[in-house]
Image (cartoon, rainbow, N blue to C red):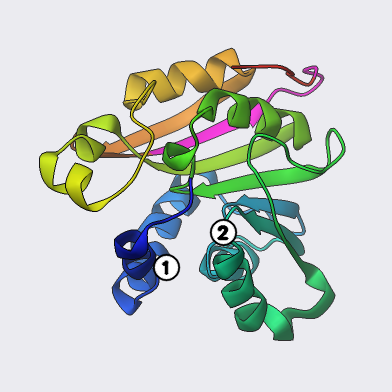
Amino acid sequence: MLLNRVEFALMNNPVRVAIQRHFEAERLLAMGGAVPGAAALEVGCGRGVGVELVLDRFGAARVDGFDLDPRMVGLARRRLVRRGECVRLWVGDATRIPAADASYDAVFDFGILHHVPDWRAALGEIHRVLKPGGRFFAEEVFERFLSHPIWRRLLEHPREDRFDRARFRSGLESAGFTVRATRSLGSGFGWFVADRAAGAPAQRGLS
């Protein structure tokens, strides 16, 4: 789903950047470690802050990123223009990633999959494009937070088949991942690190 005006403003301000840079990314880094020299993908790249973090904090050599919202991709391209050929961006859908099987050493999700109606299919695609032994880093928002009357009034999210910590973990495992670490903040937010097992076949057609 595309962001409405309220959420677009929430995602494009210095407070959001500070939280992503100093809290979310650092937690995932502590849980899953760096990926030096990796070919990485960010699902839902937004304005490009996550791409910078994957390069600078996680140590990836190159990062591809996409977002469903063309406005966000435009902002990211302007932000990342000096990164040159180590960054590639496009407008795209997490349930149909235009990449070959086993393309990436690492995939990152900074709070995107709760926007995706068929988030299970997106997990299947992420598993498919990861190399065997590759790692998935995810920070997500849970159903309990999204169902609060205030946020339901201000924000637009899919309402069917949402997840909490246990359901997201189950979704990861059903997609073929081995979950390495999870953490949560109350019942509203969670962090996950999961691997595609070495030699595991790509998962297709999940829904």
Badge 2 amino acid: Asp
Q: Residue flagged by tag 1: what amino acid is it?
A: Arg
Q: Is residue 130 left or right of residue 7?
A: right
Kind of element beneath mark 2: loop
**Label of residue 21 in the image:** 1
Q: Is 121 on the left or on the right of 145, as rendered?
A: right
Select label 2 or label 1 by which is in front.
2
Q: Which residues are magenta?
A: 191-201
Task: Let me know if residue 74 is in the magenta part.
Answer: no
Identify the residue at image location x=56%, y=31%: 194
Displayed quadrant of residue 15:
bottom left
> How far separated are the C-alphas under marks 2 and 1?
22 Å
Query: Residue at left 52%, top 29%?
Result: 119
Q: Residue at x 37, y 23 (%)?
A: 160
In this rendering, is residue 152 above or below 123?
Answer: below
| Quadrant including the C terminus | top right
Q: Which mark is residue 69?
A: 2
Above or below, comparing residue 106 to residue 45 in the picture? above
